[in-house]
Amino acid sequence: MSKVIFSNTKTKGLEPIDFYKNPKLKSEGVTDFLSTLVPFYKELLKPIINDIEKSYQDFPLTKQQTEQIKTIFEEQIDLHLPKMETILPYDNFIEWKGKKYEMNLRLHSPMNRRIMDFYKIVSICKECLAENKPMYLSLQ
């Protein structure tokens, strides 16, 4: 299985339920079991991570790497927001650059799902930068 996971804490030894029990723990990523986006994420990370094909578990990113990841995913949000689907009533919201966007995250809205994932990654980056702590990356 291949995966890319961003988190604000070390994930080794933690189960997904731990992230639901403790709201301070945040993690976002993709696995090839549930998504076809693993190669896309790895391609985005190539300029930041030297050996992207190597396996990493809880690799602490530097402040500069975290800022670069934040910039990359902010650009992805800006790129994908115009393609956002507005088929059904909305059930989630994000605020981006002073504007509120309503997000339909149902299964038939993959573009909205992708934007929300990018937004969560940017949020983890911002938190880690604000608190001066490392963001962790896991690649397999």
Image (cartoon, rainbow, N blue to C red):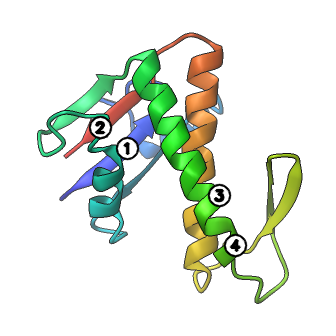
Q: Quadrant of residue 123?
A: top right
> Which residue carries the number 3 mark?
78
Residue for point 24% across, 31% down? 57
Q: Amino acid at mark 1?
A: Ile
Check whether the beta carbons of the residues at disc 3 and disc 4 lie within 8 A of each other. Answer: no
- Secondary element at image label 2: strand
For marks 2 and 1, the one nearer the N-term is: 1
Q: How many marks?
A: 4
- Secondary element at image label 1: strand
Check whether the beta carbons of the residues at disc 3 and disc 1 lie within 8 A of each other. Answer: no
The Cα–Cα distance between marks 2 and 3, rounded to whole angstroms, is: 25 Å
- Secondary element at image label 3: helix
Check whether the beta carbons of the residues at disc 1 and disc 4 lie within 8 A of each other. Answer: no
> Which residue carries the number 1 mark?
5
Comparing 133 with 78, the one in front is 78
Q: Amino acid at mark 4?
A: Pro
Residue for point 88% across, 46% down? 98
Quadrant (top left/top right/bottom left/bottom right) for the N terminus: bottom left
Q: Amino acid at mark 3?
A: Asp
Check whether the beta carbons of the residues at disc 2 and disc 3 lie within 8 A of each other. Answer: no
Observer able to see residue 20: no
Q: Amino acid at mark 2?
A: Ser
> Which residue carries the number 4 mark?
82
Q: Quadrant of residue 130?
A: top right
For marks 4 and 2, the one nearer the N-term is: 4
Check whether the beta carbons of the residues at disc 2 and disc 1 lie within 8 A of each other. Answer: yes
> Which residue carries the number 2 mark?
138
Q: Look at the picture and state if 105 lies above or below 55.
A: below
- Mark 1 vs mark 4, foreground winner is 4
Comparing 105 with 63, the one in front is 63
